[in-house]
Image (cartoon, grey):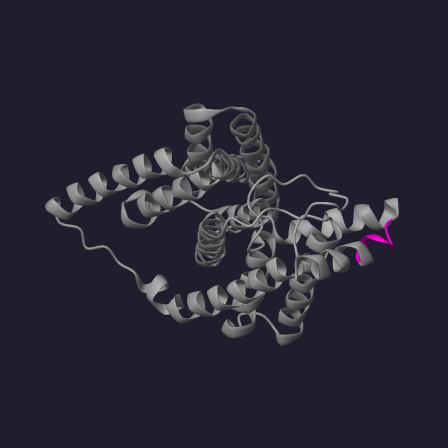
Amino acid sequence: MVFEEIMVNQFLQSFSFPLLDLFFKGATYFGHPGLWFVLGSILFWLGKEKQSFKIVSLVLFASFFSGTLKYIIGRPRPIGILQLEPEFTPSMPSGHSTIASAMASFAYFSKEIQNKYAYILIGLALLTGLSRLYLGVHFLTDVLAGLLLGTLIGWFVFKLEHKLNKMQFHITRIKEEFLVVLFFVIVIICYLFVPAEFYGSFALLGYFAGYAIYRHTQVKDILILPQTKTQSIIAVFFGLGGLGAIGLIAYFSTGLISQVTFFISGIFVTLIWPIIISKFVLKREKQKLLKIKRRNLIKKSAKAKKKKK
């Protein structure tokens, strides 16, 4: 079976030329967790926290299950063909295909977007799978397994959607202490067992830690969202700049420093940057109020002068 599958890769690569190579290298990013994490960040900063939560949840489930199965199955990457994108983890299932199909599947089942756009996402998921074959980093069965797994994950998250939206933590003092201990246990487990190539998962851990604080404390009540299109653009532009800077530090670091920095990048999305945005918006609103007061004072003084005359 491996030989027949290699023939599929070879057939696709027989059409290889620089422009097509570039196209498939771009298309494969539709299944990259970083792309969806960035999209989830943007939505969060624009006040669409529920949509952000769903997207990042899909990334979490898809990455966890595909990553776990990779190491359980332990299938090596294809050899004897051109690898246009270096990959060092096991091969089955395709993580990119899993994430791409999870997004498409959820969009299709939830009907949150029009059917025609859901079908576009399905087409992009299939294109992502094709790109993994063309780039020489997966066998055909890896891609098919990833597409199937992602479809199941999208359906599963769709079924859980109402529960995820309605989750409310009525935390007593004892439960609060238990959750703090549980959180640090999870962090320690991740530190001990997550391979270096999956350190990006700490960003997801940071995202959900910040999200829990944001949703279930008084922080949410005191934050102010961008009020104008200009403020939204500024919030997203500088937010992505900050997230990118933290991400680069995490990517080029190693060990504990990398893990902590990725974790900070997640908290940056759901807690640190929203607080900064809120202060920026509040400052702008105060400046507007001051300008309005000054105008009113000028108008009043002008009217007073006219009455005197």
| Residue 231 part of the magenta segment | no
Q: Main secondary structure of the magenta part?
A: loop
Residue 240 rendering spot, x and y as whole percentages? 58, 37
Identify the residue shown where x is 68% and y is 64%: 126
Regarding residue 16, the answer to whether it shows in the image is yes
Residue 120 rendering spot, x and y as whole percentages? 68, 67
Residue 274 rendering spot, x and y as whole percentages? 44, 40
Q: Is residue 237 left or right of residue 194?
A: right
Identify the residue shown where x is 43% and y is 32%: 264
Tell me if residue 54 comes above or below residue 244 in the rendering.
below
Q: Which residues are magenta?
A: 12-16
- Say which quarter of the image contains residue 278: top left
Q: Quadrant of the C terminus?
A: top right
Q: Quadrant of the N terminus?
A: bottom right
Judging depth in this view, the residue of 71 and 38 nearest the camera is 71
Residue 300 rendering spot, x and y as whole percentages? 51, 39
- Say which quarter of the image contains residue 189: top left
Regarding residue 304, the answer to whether it shows in the image is no
Tell me if residue 194 comes above or below residue 77 in the rendering.
above
Judging depth in this view, the residue of 229 and 190 nearest the camera is 190
Judging depth in this view, the residue of 69 and 50 nearest the camera is 69
Judging depth in this view, the residue of 40 and 227 nearest the camera is 40
Identify the residue shown where x is 11% and y is 45%: 174
Tell me if residue 52 comes above or below residue 205 in the rendering.
below
Marks counted in the figure total 0
| Residue 15 part of the magenta segment | yes
Identify the residue shown where x is 40% and y is 71%: 159
